[in-house]
Image (cartoon, grey):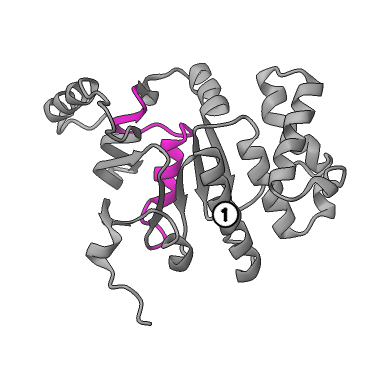
Amino acid sequence: MLKSGTTRLTTDLRRHDSLKVVGDTEEIAVRTVHLAKVYPSGQAEITVFRDLNLEVKSGESVAVIGESGAGKSTLLHLLGGLDRPSEGAIYFGERRIEELDDGELSEFRNREIGFVWQSHSLLPEFTALENVMMPLLIRGTAHQKAARTAMDRLVQVGLERRATHRAGELSGGEQQRVSLARALVASPKVLLADEPTGSLDYRTGEGIVSLLEQLQRQLELTSILVTHNLAFARRCDRVLILDKGQLHPMDDRVPPPQT
């Protein structure tokens, strides 16, 4: 744990715990408080970021952009409970997830978060339908119910006719659609996407982004997207730049493109 900022962190956490949603006030779905990630490197340390604060409202789509190595994927891994911070707190609603043990965190990820990566990570020996069913089967859902729910998600991404095809028989864009269906099959509240169009050509990537927008509205998702594609990022409700360990609103740092 980092030694600095402990008193401030404790004060801010108490302030967060006292927050209430009143009337039409928008609920905060994801929140970080003085988040830090530091890696040991021999006798020194590598600080990815420190004192990083983020609030994402329920139903909001936020894009995070920045140079390679800025820590975008690291941030997404922390938000998704795939890694633990060196300091600070991560809240999903009122639940502080970095305090969960490994078993609790695994269950939380399965039930509350959907992940989409640049690499679709589908199991090649299984069909599209079977790949989408996996999170539900891991949860213990009965096979027949899992199959029905998975098919519903494949219908939503336009791949019901490819349900019985193995992953290797699908195009890159189709594989990413299956990955998206798998991410959403367990009805998560939050979708985390790390360069979901990075391995696709622009036209195919455009289709994936349009599908993400459609499902965001339809399923009332809160989503956080990491991307290098500024055009895709601008289609989110808000764009943040991760630079020198801090998040900045894009309009404060980058002029709008010339038309």
Q: Name the quadrant of the N terminus.
A: top left
- Using the image, determine if residue 172 lies above or below residue 4: below
* Region rendered in magenta: 67-94
Q: Taking 94 as reference, is 246 left or right?
A: left
Q: Residue at x 31, y 33 (%)?
A: 86
Q: Is residue 122 visible?
A: no
- Amino acid identity at mark 1: Pro
Q: Residue at x 62, y 29 (%)?
A: 186
Asked whether 88 falls inside the magenta stretch, the response is yes
Left or right position of 10 against 65: left
Residue 148, placed above or below residue 70: above
User: Does the image show residue 216?
Assistant: yes
Above or below residue 129? Residue 169 is below
Q: Position of residue 60 (x, y in %)?
A: 40, 44
Q: Secondary structure at mark 1?
A: loop
Image-based side of 234 in relation to 177, left or right: left
Q: Please state, as top left, top right, bottom left or bottom right, where the C terminus lies in the image.
A: bottom left
Give 63 or 117, whichever is nearer the viewer.
Answer: 63
Q: Percent x, y for residue 140? A: 70, 17
Against 110, residue 66 (above or below) is below
- Image spot of residue 126 (x, y percent): 83, 39
Kindly indicate the quadrant of the structure image that contains residue 35.
top left
Disc 1 residue crowd, few under 14, some 14–19, many 20+, Cα 10 Å: many
Residue occupied by mark 1: 196
